[in-house]
Structures are given as C-alpha cells and as structure tokens.
Amino acid sequence: MPLIRFLNTYEPVTEFYRGLAPALARAGLRSHVVISGADYRGGRSSLVEALAPAGGVTHVPAGVRIADTRLKKLVVLMTYSFGAVLLSLFGRPPALNFFLSQPPLFAAWGRVLRTLRGTPYCCLVMDLYPHVLAASNVMREISWGYRLLRRLMIGTLAAADTVFVIGRCMRDRLIQEGVPADRIVVTPNWANEEVIRPVPRADNALARSFGIGDEFVVLYSGNMGIAHEFGTVLAAAERLLGERDIRFLFLGEGARRPEVEREVARKGLTNVTVGPLQPAASMSESQSLGDVHFVSMKAAFTGLLVPSKAYSALAAGRPLLYEGAADGEVARLIAEHGLGHVVSPGDVEAMVTAIRAMAADRSSTERAGAHARALGVGALGQAAAVERYVQALTALLRAPAPGPAA
C-alpha cells in the first residue's frame, strides 16, 4: 500500500488529517503524519487513536508540552525541523512527501529529498510565506531577505508535483507569482459536520451561561490574529449601543485579543462580550451561539490566507458577515451562494446596515443559515473536499512526475 508522509509542525486547526487519512485508506493509500510532540494550544483528542486504522503518527520530541509563548514556539520550530529532516532523510522513503505550511518554507526540503531519494513531493498552502510576513509588516518587500525567501518559496512551489491551495484567490496569486497553473489544485477547507451541528438556542446550555436570550447575536469565534480586522465591527457595535436587541460576542485568543478588550473597555461597549476560546467538546454549542458569524481579513492578506472559521459557520448552519476584499474566497462563496453579506474593509456604515437588516428579518437570516448548513454537509462539506484530495493524490501517484518548471 503506497505511503504518503505528511509533514507539518502541528495538527492543523481544521479536521485535515482526521478527515483525509481514512478516505485515503479506503482508496488504498496509507498515511504517515509527522508532527511535533508539542501542541499549539491543546484540548484536542489523540491524533494517534484517530489515525490508527488509516496510518501512523510520529511525534518529534519538542522539550515543551504547549507552545504558548514565542520562545516555546521557536524551540518547537527548531526541534521539529531537525527531527523531520532526520526522519525523512534516513527513514524508509514514502511514495510521496506532502508538506503543509509549517514550518514556514520547510517545503523546500522536499526538493532536496526528491534529488537525494527520488521521492516526489506536493505542498498544501494554507499560509503563503514569506508573503504573510510582508503583509504583517514583519518584513519589507524591498529587503534582500524577503526577495531571497520569496524566490525560494515560489521556486519550491513551481517545482512541486502538485500544489494544493484552499481558495481560488490563492490560486490566482500563485499563478501571478509564476507557479504553473496546471499543477495547482483548489481544495477548500472544511469543518466536520458531525462534530459541529446546529443547536437551537433554547437547548444551548452555553447560551444560558453567557446570558443570551432573544437578542440577535453577531459571533466572532476563533483566533484573533494579525490578519484580522476588528476596528470596523467595534465601531459598528458602538453605533448600535442603543439597540438592545443586538449583541456582539467574541470568543477566542490571539495576538489581537488584548486590543479588542481595550477598545471594548475604552468605548464602554456594554453590548460586546469577550470570552475565551471554547473547548472542542462544545463546538456545536459555541458555534451556534451567533445568529450570524462575523469573519474578517485585511485586504493585504487576500490570496495569502483563507479564514477557516467560515466553514465552521456553515457546519453550524449560520450565515456569514464578511469584512474583506471582494475577490477573497469567503467573499466569493457568499456572493455565489447567498450566504450573507460582504462589507469592504473599513466601511462602518455598510456593516451597521447589514447587521440591522439581518436582525430585522430573522426569518430570512434563518433561511440563509439553513442553506449554509446544506452546503456545509454537501458541496462545501468534508466529503466533497476530501474527495478532491483523494482524486488528485491517486492521480499523482499513478502519473510520472513532471519535470522542474522553467
């Protein structure tokens, strides 16, 4: 049975391995996942048990249990890179090396392995580095370091046997950067519709714990990171302070959470509640807290990232309020399927208007949510996304490897 070796520092926040490995096993392909012994945030069930029937898991010793500080994350990055290099260089070679986005630029090791061991490789781009660093103002595009890293990454992707991307905006960006279009496969993220299900508010114990009654709730759930924009929605919350039937709920962690908390306190936003990231065991309840899910991404990150939290909203049967560029993947999905509203970054008036419209017409909002759930278990669900991977990977392993791109 051909073996695919997956290499990524942490288990992705999506149900990637847990959904894909069993499907690959049914197609006659075995999975070997190489991840760090440290967790990114903890709280998930054992990946070893989940993959036992479909493949194996190797944990690279990290020296720490949870990578919850910058220093620990650096330690994990270094230990994982060293351990993964040794394992892939001296271990039994797989039929295919499959690199995800972490550590950044580690996929370049795939080119080395193909030269030394003759093993083809493919990449899944969930975050495009070093471009994300430039969009975050960590690096300057004109710097020699950025130009060198960009050349290394684009060269790695252009030489890969297949490049998987999680959105059409990413495909467009990579083609623009010089990656051959015929090697790019669009495979969207997904949420496990069995793990995340709609829960009526009357049956939702978590809603009672937050004191949520009949209000219209705008929910933000997940990482509050550098790619996300919160100024517009908080300005909208300030405008809506006097409308007591509308409430905002932010659940999550991340670099920008302190900023959100400061703004809520500074503006006296009594209609905004900021709470912790909820445990995986209560995903159905937490994702069902909102009548609509707010998702945002700064325009500079379009084509570099796709917010995976949008797919959790679909599984929970909730429409989307997206603040971001119109050509981003989430904006395209909303426009194509009638899944909610798209607001241009910084447009407070449009944000307020969209929220008021959804709150005033609950029946239409609920119909959009039911449509979202149908898509989340169908065309945009786990089974459909996994099938795209299975077809592409089985075709890749049957076909002769292409030569390096010009």
Image (tube, rainbow, N blue to C red):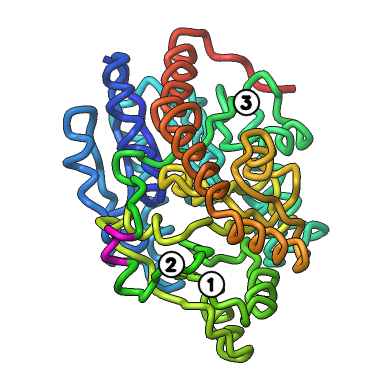
| In-front residue for pair 320/229 | 320
Quarter of the image with the N terminus is top left
> Which residue has dot 3 on it?
184
Is residue 38 in view?
no
Task: Of the two numbered discs 2 and 3 on the same chain, state the one appearing first in sequence.
Answer: 3
Magenta range is: 202-206
Disc 2 marks which residue?
Answer: 214
Q: Residue at x 59, y 54 (%)?
A: 361
Q: Residues within 10 Å of mark 1 (few under 14, many from 20)?
A: some
* Residue at left offset 39%, top offset 55%: 288
Q: Which labelled disc corresponds to residue 245?
A: 1
Res. 289 image quadrant: bottom left
Residue that sits furthest to the right in the current view: 142
- x and y percentages locating residue 169 in the rendered image: 69, 38
Distance between the alpha carbons at the discs numbered 2 and 3: 46 Å
Name which residue lies at 27% across and 17% down: 26
Q: Is residue 280 left or right of residue 273?
A: left
Q: Is residue 205 magenta?
A: yes
In the rendered view, tell whether residue 310 sits above or below residue 110: below
Q: Is residue 378 above or below residue 218?
A: above
Q: Are the two marked residues, 1 and 3, in contact with CB atoms closer than 8 angstroms?
A: no
